[in-house]
Image: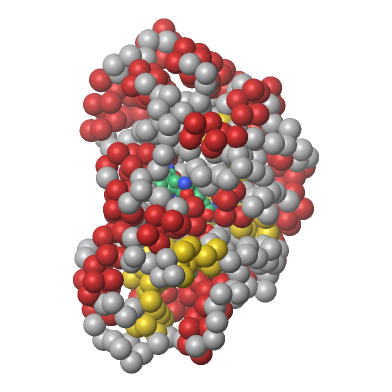
Amino acid sequence: MTGNKILFFNPRSANATFRIPNSVMSIAATVEGVLDWAVVDGNRELDPLDKLRSYLRTGAYRYIGFTAMPGPQLKQAIPFAKVIREEFPDTIMIWGGYFPSSHFKVTLDSGWVDFIINGPGEHAFPSLIQALETGKPYEFIPNLIFKQDGKIIKTKKETLFDQDPLPKIPYDHLDQYYSLDGYLGKTYLGTRTVAYHSSIGCPFTCSFCAVVPLYEARWKARSAPLVFEDIRYLHDKWGANAIEFHDNNFFVSEKRAVAFSELVRPLHMNWWGMARIDTMSGYSDASLEKIREAGCRMIFFGAESGNDEVLKQFDKGGTQSGKQIAAFAARMRKFDIIPEYSFVLGAPAPDKEAVQKQIDFDIAFIRKIKDVNPDTEIVVYTYSPVPTEGSELWAQAQSQGFSFPQHLEDWVEPQWEQFNLRKNPLTPWLEPEHTNSIRDFETVLNGYYPTASDIKLSPVKRRALQWVSGLRYKTKFYRYPYEIRFLQKTWKYRQPEIQGF
Ligand code: B12
């Protein structure tokens, strides 16, 4: 090997063909103009391993950077890393993203990965490359995890940095590898939807959320004018007409959300983002009106549960309560913004009956939300533990016998994929009847209230689904809803919780 180029890899995540791979692109931005880089996007390649090999065979690439979130991305990330380690042993393999940051031991124990970037990588990655290029020590660079003499070393975590000085995503450079056109997809928001990330982290410490171990309750945002500058560029140059804000918590600052709304309004773009119910309950009517007028059509909220005790168990923090969740859904009707509420069912409880009682409670609560605002979109997840050090919920999960795979390759087993999709949580306290009661209710609910985000579902199909599910929903008879499942399967019904959003 003679070169010092960097190859980035975004493994395939189903149904994500139009999403700009922001995780690796934000890292590529930091070496733009300094070192040559290329990118392979598993969503845009029929045979991405072949493509990776074709770059590596040139001998010009010394570094390879993988991003990985738990779930379908691991199906490429893990076997490809193994092959690359075997066929190109001199390549320095660096992983970043939610999976390796949370599951660093199993990742490094595989022997295929040399370095993990633990959380934000915009400083750590270029510093590491510079150290490796110049033969200087890297042991003091924050946000790194690696092995030394068989021992795992975690360097200190850097305080979350300001976002405005960070370099811009090199969209034009990305376009040389994959046409940007191919990333602007058709959604219910628009015909050319762009994925944009305007802030990082989240100021809360919910114990079921994977964002917490990475960002440690910190949040930093790009200021409204800079976000707008990027959006205007994507609109003017690439014809973007809708935006999915992928921030964990876009609406932390009312001032920033309103400032952005005022700027973007003339572009007539539809957009979507994620928020907390208690934060937005505090927004004034005037702010919510401005946000709607600026094109915000739907907002995703972590409602989690209508039971205040469970909200406490989840460390939801803030002021969120069952009462507030319902009141806010009702309030959103006035503004014509669809609240998309996600619930996390199946939390640990002292015994089987208590688990079912809680599931039944939340099913009744979800029905209540639909009564106060039928437009509310409901996303139902099953609680899947995340390794949040120091959290009681994680301790509870472990004490009841839950553990993650001990070998990296085991993560690609179908049952762990289902776990990552939060469909089959593999948690010892959930019996099949618990999971079935969640899935059956979800099927009937989705039948009676099909999601507005499924653009392939015609009005006729929608009505047919509603008709078939009506009696079950009204009589609360959810068991064995095979006929609804058959229609959903036939019409490839889109479930945001499985496909991501
Ligand atoms: C975009 C996205 C997707 C896209 C993937 C698009 C793609 N790239 O191909 C889609 C919609 C497909 C998706 C799917 C899923 N996702 Co997703 N996704 C996100 C989201 C919203 C944004 C990711 C992003 O672009 N961030 C912006 C970048 C800049 O931040 P970042 O990824 O953290 O990257 C930084 C560091 O981690 C690090 N880094 C990351 N990668 C790399 C690589 C290298 C080489 C280096 C050096 C550094 C580095 O540096 C970056 C800059 O600081 C995140 C939440 C979030 N806001 O981050 C969830 C998130 C990652 N997804 C998550 C999950 C669980 C899923 C699913 C598996 C399940 C689900 N139902 O959502 C599905 C799978 C669906 C499927 N069938 O494929 C979880 C992960 C939870 C966990 N346990 O770790 C998250 C955190 C959402 C959440 N809050 O729960 N997702």
Is residue 378 in view from this perspective?
Answer: no
Query: Is 325 left or right of 135, judged from the image as shown?
Result: right
Please provide percent x and percent y for residue 145: 50, 65
Q: Looking at the image, which residue is at 38% across and 76% down?
A: 92
Please provide percent x and percent y for residue 350: 52, 18
Q: Quadrant of the N terminus?
A: bottom left
Query: Is 262 left or right of 395, judged from the image as shown?
Result: right
The residue at the far top in this view is 475
The residue at the far bottom in this view is 2
Query: Is 288 left or right of 427, judged from the image as shown?
Result: right
The residue at the far front in this view is 149
Question: How many numbered discs sit on the rendered protein?
Answer: 0
Q: Looking at the image, which residue is at 33% across and 54% down?
A: 408
Please provide percent x and percent y for residue 449: 43, 26
Q: Looking at the image, which residue is at 51% across and 90% down?
A: 134
Instruction: Give the quadrant of residue 231.
Output: bottom right
Instruction: Give the quadrant of residue 141.
Output: bottom right
As rendered, which of 226 and 79 lies closer to the eye? Answer: 79
Q: Looking at the image, which residue is at 41% across and 70% down?
A: 114
Please provide percent x and percent y for residue 495: 38, 37
Q: How is the image coloured?
A: secondary structure
Residue 112 versus residue 291 in the image, above or below: below
As rendered, which of 276 and 466 lies closer to the eye? Answer: 276
As rendered, which of 19 and 120 lies closer to the eye? Answer: 120
Is residue 306 in view from this perspective?
Answer: yes
